[in-house]
Image (tube, rainbow, N blue to C red):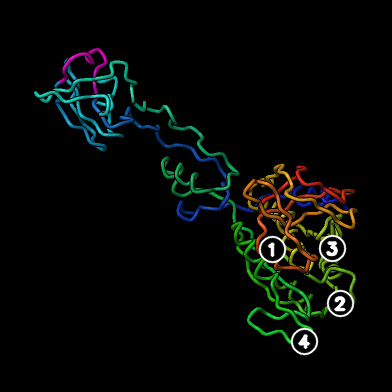
Amino acid sequence: MISFEEAYKIVTTDIQPLSAEIVTLADSRGRVLSERIVSDMNMPPFDKAAVDGFACRRVDLGKALKVTAVIPAGSATAQAIEEGCCAKIMTGAMIPAGADCVVMVEETAIAADKTVIVKNLKTKNNIAYKAEDIQQGDSVIPAHTLIKPQHMAVMAAVGAVNPQVFRRVRLTVFSTGDELVEPQQKPKTGQIRNSNGIQLINQAAAMGCEARYGGIIPDDESASRKLISEALVWSDVLIMSGGISMGDFDYIPQILNDLGFQLHFQTIAVQPGKPTVFGRSGEKFVMALPGNPVSSLNIFELLAKPMLYRLMGYAFEPQRILLPLSQDYRRKRASRLAFVPARLTSESAVEPIGYHGSAHISALVEATALFEVPVGTDFIAKGEQVHVRFI
């Protein structure tokens, strides 16, 4: 049994990103850039008005100014501003030659003869100057960035309509065990519905993986071997739940060995989630998670997610913050690092969610976070700070 820290290092070390491909900007959300984004133009591309108002010469601000033009946004031409004159201008419109400031509408008054009187002679320039944000050729987004809507806005602004990104991970999810039936079936005596399959598929899909469901692997060595071998032809990664403990029908570790996988660990000093297998054969990966649903959700978040993101070119690191505990917390055994389902209170404290063990799936309904209980700690008092990860 290895520590969680050792396991994390193993699944995040020497992981090379998958190949790159070109996608459209509209399809790029959630992908990871394989090359930097470079601007094809200056931003702003010209001096433009930052407010609605009047484009003026500062030396004329004490005079009654004649309005000689109205300049809407998008207009490419406007006559130069001459002495004693100004132009009414809209936000985003090009500053006409001769003007060196834009006086806000609120800082002006219109005289009876339709001239403009400036009330604030110390007005700001209110001009967004050419290239003050970005210069043509500037790198605006680095490679290995996970693309979010705000990145897409920048990409659109600089014309990056066909970004190059790393390929999605092709991933197959299996559940194991003769006791399982699919959710649409009514379990018979001794059976339970397969909840891990849909959970793991959607944890992977939420990251941007191309996730498939491989079905339920029966407690039969020959059938298990066949299903795993077939899935590996298409998949970069197999995610499995169950079949990895010490039972008579837990064939998965031996099958992986026989298929040429090096198993880097099979048990972790973590609670819940002790029986977890991670194996690698070249550029193929398998992570076999415990069958109990709280364990499978936890270990996917803690170990599978950082590994999968690295395959997609993104060096994901979980956000861990310190928050106070809302109540006393006790546990009976303290030999493993624990990750406890929790939620945040309105006072920004962490409230443990009572659960009866790693099979207590309904405990996850209100869980928004996991907090850490270090090895050797069996009691944490109310108000003490704990490390929290959001899920």
Q: Are marks 3 and 1 in contact (CB under 8 Å)?
A: no
Helix, strand or loop under label 2: loop
Q: Are marks 1 and 4 in contact (CB under 8 Å)?
A: no
Which comes before the other along the chain, label 2 or label 3?
Answer: 2
Q: Amino acid at mark 3?
A: Pro
Answer with left or right where residue 140 lies relative to residue 375.
left
Which comes before the other along the chain, label 4 or label 3?
Answer: 4
Instruction: State the separation of the CA atoms marked 4 and 2.
Output: 19 Å
Which residue bears the numbered disc 1? 364
For marks 2 and 3, give the one nearer the viewer.
3
Q: Amino acid at mark 4?
A: Thr
Which comes before the other along the chain, label 1 or label 4?
Answer: 4
Residue depicted at x 49% and y 44%: 150
Which comes before the other along the chain, label 3 or label 1?
Answer: 3
Instruction: Locate residue 22, reporting x and y percent.
Output: 51, 52
Instruction: Locate residue 353, reporting x and y percent.
Output: 72, 59
Helix, strand or loop under label 4: loop
Task: Using the image, tell me which numbered label, if any, was put on residue 249.
Answer: 2
Foreground: 98 or 182?
182
Query: Is residue 125 one of those drawn in magenta?
Result: no
Which residue bears the numbered disc 4? 189
Which residue bears the numbered disc 3? 275
